[in-house]
Image (cartoon, helix red, strand yellow):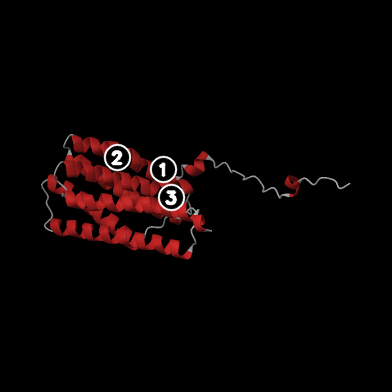
Amino acid sequence: MATPINIQSQKKHEPAPTFVRVPLRDLLNLPNSLTLLRLFSIPLFLGFLSYRHYRGALWVFGFAALTDSLDGTVARWFDAKTELGSFLDPFADKLMLVSAFVVLTMAGDIPPWLFGIVIVRDVVIVFGYFLVVFLTGERIPVRPSYVGKASTFFQLACVVAVLARLNGNAPGFFTYLLYMAAGCTALSGVHYIYRGLEILFYREPEMFE
């Protein structure tokens, strides 16, 4: 009489995923601490704007822009890149910029058409990223393009120029700066859409396998 075969016992059991506990001191290294400092400066920046202390808002925004350039440089120099930092850095940048654009647009200091371009581009990028992750079943690393970095630079420059105008130091090239920011922002949105379609073209979506 044949003995019954336990089919489940023949299946290869995949090893359970191992989770490595990262020490807090490694997460809160110097680059991540600078990023957190930038995040915590956002309420102070918005407070200065709400009370029309534009000089204070300009100083805080300038400090945030400085930490933005420092954290990435320090992380590369000291090989201190972390998963937390790769998420927090763009999140802090976007939160600071969107907060500034919302408040300054509502006050009539930034034209609504520029605000619309910035918001639509960000929504398209976020939605497109999650759509690509859903279709491919993979976590796609986020790497900003040169056009994306240029659009962020011009958006930062627009906020600084607006705050300078409100302090009585209006730059003569302000209008051109607005158009440059709009153009780079729209172009970067198109470029990120192209990159997403390129990823889908070379990787067969999981739902069609």
Of helix, strand and loop, which one carries label 1? helix
| Quarter holding residue 20 | top right
Q: Is residue 38 left or right of residue 132?
A: left
- On the image, which quarter does residue 105 sit in? top left
The residue labelled by disc 3 is 86
7 sits to left or right of 84 = right
Per the image, the residue denoted by label 2 is 42
Residue kind at label 2, given as amino acid type = Ile
Who's the residue at 26% across and 42% down the image?
99
Q: Are marks 2 and 3 in contact (CB under 8 Å)?
A: no
Residue 44 visible within the image: yes
One can see residue 31 in this view: no
Residue 146 in the figure: left or right of residue 31: left
* Residue 23 vs residue 109, the one in the foreground: 109
Judge by depth and name the residue closer to the eye, 101 or 58. 101
Q: Position of residue 133 (x, y in %)?
A: 45, 53
Element at label 3: helix
Tag 1 residue: 33
Query: What residue is rendered at 32% in x and 58% in y?
Result: 148
Q: Residues within 10 Å of mark 2 (few under 14, many from 20)?
A: many
Tell which residue pokes out farthest to the front in this image: 1
Image coordinates for residue 96, horizontal then vertical, percent? 29, 44
